Image (cartoon, coloured by chain):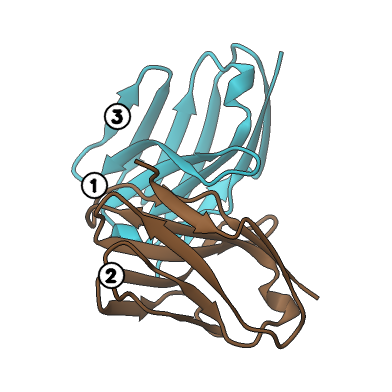
Amino acid sequence: NAGVTQTPKFQVLKTGQSMTLQCAQDMNHEYMSWYRQDPGMGLRLIHYSVGAGITDQGEVPNGYNVSRSTTEDFPLRLLSAAPSQTSVYFCASSYSRESPLHFGNGTRLTVT
Amino acid sequence: GENVEQHPSTLSVQEGDSAVIKCTYSDSASNYFPWYKQELGKGPQLIIDIRSNVGEKKDQRIAVTLNKTAKHFSLHITETQPEDSAVYFCAASKNAGKSTFGDGTTLTVKP
């Protein structure tokens, strides 16, 4: 039981490049979400999903796309990377509305 | 939307002392209040949570209190140990997948 697995752990992009951050969970959780964490700030919600085929925007969705074709996977796509997207990205999953979030160990992204 | 404020941003205590971190929230419909501990290079991990129908919950050295009327909740750590040193986040939500987090408290426990 690996929990929530994020890949890659580190990534450097040039401005304008695109990439996909991968997230997979093996706990059969319906709820999955993406957060970004910037220095001195809490985690801010980018996008979330309440089940396969259902996604919605969070607090800071601009510049990011998501899809949820399976229960296990919830990839985050950066369409055209910008320096403002330099951050640590965390994927999380939960069993239900009132269950705790299980986080991956993050992807540290630098955009130059 | 929901807004969560967390204080203090940094907290330094001597080993064995108690530590208290406080959070306030704005949305009276929020009904789930978890606390997470984040160690360097890792994702946050749940340490304790409380639901809106409960006023207090305790787990060994850790306790959380909730005042729904005042819209604030607090984390209490007693008999602190060096391994308690980490960043702590409070959160509030109506939907766990859509939690709003405080900005975090860096706790340092000095031996």
Q: Is residue A93 left or right of residue A77?
A: left
Q: Is residue B79 left or right of residue B54?
A: right
Of the residues tagged 2 and 1, which is closer to the observer?
A: 2
Between marks 2 and 1, how big is the CA–CA gap?
32 Å
Tag 3: amino acid: Lys
Q: Farthest residue toward the left?
A: B53
The mark that comes first in sequence, 3 or 1, is 1
Determine the residue positioned at 42% across, 24% down.
B62
Report which residue position mark 1 lands on.
Answer: B52
- Colour brown maps to chain: A
Report which residue position mark 2 lands on.
Answer: A70
Same subunit, labels 3 and 1: the answer reads: yes
In the image, residue A87 sits, relative to residue B9, either above or below, namely: below
Q: Secondary structure at mark 2?
A: loop
Identify the subunit bearing mark 2.
A
Residue B37 visible to an observer of this rendering: yes
Q: Is residue B23 left or right of residue A41?
A: left
- Colour cyan maps to chain: B
Q: Farthest residue toward the right?
A: A112
Query: Could you classify mark 1 by the number of other residues whose Cα lies within 10 Å: few (under 14), some (14-19), or many (20 or more)?
Result: some
> Looking at the picture, how far across and down is residue B60, in whole percent?
37, 17
> Looking at the picture, how far across and down is residue B91, in whole percent?
42, 51
Query: Could you classify mark 2 by the number of other residues whose Cα lies within 10 Å: few (under 14), some (14-19), or many (20 or more)?
Result: few
Q: Secondary structure at mark 3?
A: strand
Determine the residue positioned at 32% across, 43% down.
B67
Quarter-wise, where is residue A9 in the image?
A: bottom right
Identify the subunit bearing mark 3.
B
> Looking at the picture, how far across and down is residue A79, in whole percent?
58, 86
Determine the residue positioned at 26% across, 65% down.
A71
Report which residue position mark 3 lands on.
Answer: B57
